[in-house]
Amino acid sequence: MSPFLDLPPLTAAQFAATEDKVAALLHTTADVIVTQGEALLPLEAAIRGAAHPGSTALNIVTGPYGQTFGNWLRDCGAKVVDLAVPFDTAVSGAQVAEALAADPSIDFVSLVHAEAATGNTNPVAEIAAAVRAHGALLMLDAVASVAAEPLLTDAWGVDLCVIGGQKAMGGPAGVSAVSVSARAWERIAANPAAPRHSYLSLLDWKERWTDAGRTALPHAPAQLEMLALDACLDRIAADGLPTVIARHRAAAAATRAGVRALGTLDPFVPDDAHAAPVATTLRTPAGLAAAGLAAELLRLDPTLPVQAGGGALARTMLRVNHYGPAAALTPVRATLTALATATGTDAGPALTAADTAWGEALTAGR
Ligand SMILES: *Cc1c(COP(=O)(O)O)cnc(C)c1O
């Protein structure tokens, strides 16, 4: 019999246990709600819960998702201050502090931790400190950073932390989670425009599930996705979160070192400190379209974790993902070998550089 058929309904106890595992992964004692949908669902729910006419949001734009958040915030009637930096860098705590000082009415800040689409990552600890000092709420999109780099929700002071299972966690898409601090609950409860009796309502979950003692589920959850998420959380716990994080960091370091040794493509994010461990983005040389290169690489080896950038970036950006099982030396070496073949260069120096960087990154993390 297929293990995917005739499944008994997921119990409230199982659902609550998975939420607790997510809370441990996020280093938070705040309420965690697992949401039945892709990560954009809790991200939109968090914004619509917190933003309203009369509120002012600082929307930090370091990649494509920041633009989406700005649109939702404006749709909620909030005044939006956009702080945008080029997608191949990171925003600094000082830049955020300056933007906050310029507008004392800012009461909400939206930030993406790591950007899988552009390969950059932001220094959340220093940004969160600035937000905290200002007294605003901080929403963090940690979909691409969770399990790839440290994510200290409570220690940093993140009020709304959103994750999905399908990137560095190596788990299922279509199921996601958000942690909600006590301060965030107060603000959402006081917002007359916060969604109620809606799929986007965090308050519905709080009343009907969290505050009700998590004994009766308000709906029938998607069993397969929940079981897959739970299995993925168990696997990360068994491997050890620091080990999983170190593998992502080492995969990115090895890819960057290998590509630099190849010499035909450049890291899209030039500064190593701004490079996301979840995915390494590469700038293709003029005349070599990234979409065509990605197709050629996949023809050489269909298992490679590569894709062209989204939208206009499909011309100039190649993405090497280090998601979950791809955070290993073998797929990095295979990618470099195919890149050497596709661009007519010798793979030898790239592989040597990658091996060295992989070893150094793992040792540095100890
Ligand atoms: C992938 C990703 C998302 C979207 O996740 P979905 O589950 O596809 O909605 C949001 N933010 C970031 C930073 C991502 O990398």
Image: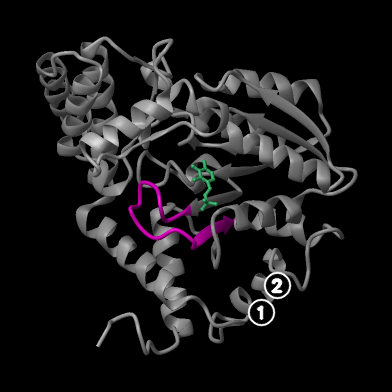
Q: Nearer the viewer, residue 6 or 163?
A: 6
Residue 345 sits above or below residue 231 on the image: above
- Badge 2 element: helix
**Residue 109 position within the rendered picture, expressed as x and y whole percent measured from the top left:** 68, 37
Residue 37 sits above or below residue 148 on the image: below
The answer to whether residue 322 is left or right of residue 217 is left
Q: Which residues are magenta?
A: 164-180
Residue 136 appears in the rendering: no
Q: Residues within 10 Å of mark 2 (few under 14, many from 20)?
A: some
Q: Main secondary structure of the magenta part?
A: loop
Q: Residues within 10 Å of mark 1 (few under 14, many from 20)?
A: some
Q: What residue sits 44% from the left and 52% below the top?
A: 26
Q: Nearer the viewer, residue 238 or 276?
A: 276
Residue position for label 2: 204
- Badge 1 element: helix
Residue 266 appears in the rendering: yes
Residue position for label 1: 208
Q: Quadrant of the N terminus?
A: bottom left
Residue 344 sits above or below residue 70 on the image: above
**Residue 107 position within the rendered picture, expressed as x and y whole percent measured from the top left:** 77, 39
- Cα distance between the residues tagged 1 and 2: 6 Å
Q: Amino acid at mark 2?
A: Asp
Q: What residue sits 52% from the left and 26% below the top?
A: 313
Q: What residue sits 40% from the left and 60% below the top?
A: 172
Tags 1 and 2 touching, CB below 8 Å: yes
The answer to whether residue 39 is left or right of residue 231 is right
The answer to whether residue 150 is left or right of residue 57 is left
**Residue 223 position within the rendered picture, expressed as x and y whole percent measured from the top left:** 43, 77
